[in-house]
Amino acid sequence: MIQIESITKRYADGTVAVDDLSLEIPDSSITVLVGPSGCGKTTTLRMINRMVEPSSGRILLDGQDIHQQPVNALRRSMGYVIQNAGLFPHRTILANIATVPRMLGWDKVRARKRASELMERVGLDSSLAKRYPYQLSGGQQQRVGVARALAADPPVLLMDEPFSAVDPIVRKVLQGELLRIQEELGKTIVFVTHDIDEAIRLGDTIAVLRTGGKLAQFAAPDDLLSHPADAFVEDFLGAGRGVRRLSFFTSAGLELTTAPIVAADATDAQVAERAAADAPYLLVTDTDGKPLGWAEPKSLTGGASSVPAAELISYGRPFESGRDSLRDALDCAVLSPTGWAVAVDDTGRVVGVASQLTIGDAIRRAHAEKGAEASDRASAAAAGLKVAP
């Protein structure tokens, strides 16, 4: 655990970057520091590995004051990932990743073997090992940065806006990779970002800082979205916080229907049977059960194969039933030209469809269940009982 106790950073000109900040960062979790520019996020991160020394207060790592440890040993015990990766341009990818193990005295063979293992773990092809950073894309360079930070197997990983310099598609992929790696390794990660959506996706807990380095709120993402501490936090979360909160409601209980689904090889009689369900559209699937597109029932006279695939109405983007959230399901329904979301399994086969109305009912039920849980917890707390999360 990292304990930050009343840390303040005041510079010689009187500027206060961090003001009396106290946090407890749990082991094996991702804690995100978020807030507007100039709120002290990066300064706080750098005080954890003593790249910046605090003016007052202290930081404990597993109960020991970090200022009582040799600074070089402290930094080598923590992985550090920054924006634009910060790689050594004159070293190969393999040598970049092996840097810290070599500094710690590992022999060349062992360090390079570790680097090769980590390339695979972060999703880098082994063919890139002998290339140099300038020969890699931005996303690949960031993966190298993460691999290098993990090379000596540090218990703590500090990440300073590591994905902000890449495009949104690559950024989402890298976020997913980080969550996968964290699930496997269980590091204590402190992650700095200015992007609240990134914070909500990655964080187990989120610390919102105000300008001037004061803590505004420290809470789990769902609690943060449900109960912002004040107007500042509410404004920072933005107008979409209600939709963002749907990310924490599973689609597992969403009612799906298969009534408006027909296979591409369906006969005229089978199409007519499906059309009798009074659905405005029928979803046509291929013979493997994967979606092709929507069609009006009257256009399928002569069987589902009578309409060329090019004339089908797009089904938009499907969501994976049970794995994706109600936010994903709602997004799919809103983006669909028909207003219906298509649910698939992990192989991409259709398991059902849901209308916006059905998804709205599921959202209302989820809110009611969440409210009941909160009420039960409050009652238990008042009675001095512990309730499992």
Image: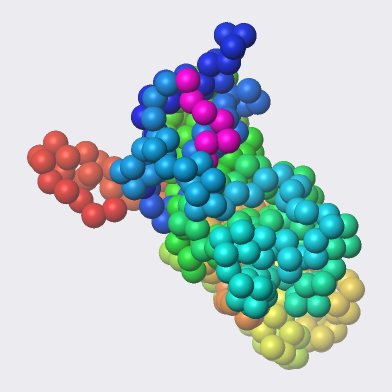
- The relative height of residue 264 versus residue 46 in the rendered view (above or below) is below
Q: Main secondary structure of the magenta part?
A: loop
**Residue 89: percent from left, percent from top:** 83, 54
Q: Which residues are magenta?
A: 49-55
Residue 349 at least partly seen: yes
- The relative height of residue 346 versus residue 139 in the rendered view (above or below) is below
**Residue 185: percent from left, percent from top:** 48, 65
Which residue is found at the position 68% from the left and 63% from the top? 97
Q: Quadrant of residue 274?
A: bottom right
**Residue 43: percent from left, percent from top:** 57, 30
Which residue is found at the position 76% from the left and 53% from the top? 87
Which residue is found at the position 39% from the left and 30% from the top? 58
Q: Is residue 51 magenta?
A: yes
- The relative height of residue 130 versus residue 12 in the rendered view (above or below) is below
- The relative height of residue 85 versus residue 100 in the rendered view (above or below) is above
Q: Nearer the viewer, residue 5 or 389?
A: 5
Q: Quadrant of residue 337?
A: bottom right
Q: Is residue 274 left or right of residue 91?
A: left
Q: Is residue 224 magenta?
A: no
Which residue is found at the position 73% from the left and 69% from the top? 94
Residue 335 at least partly seen: no
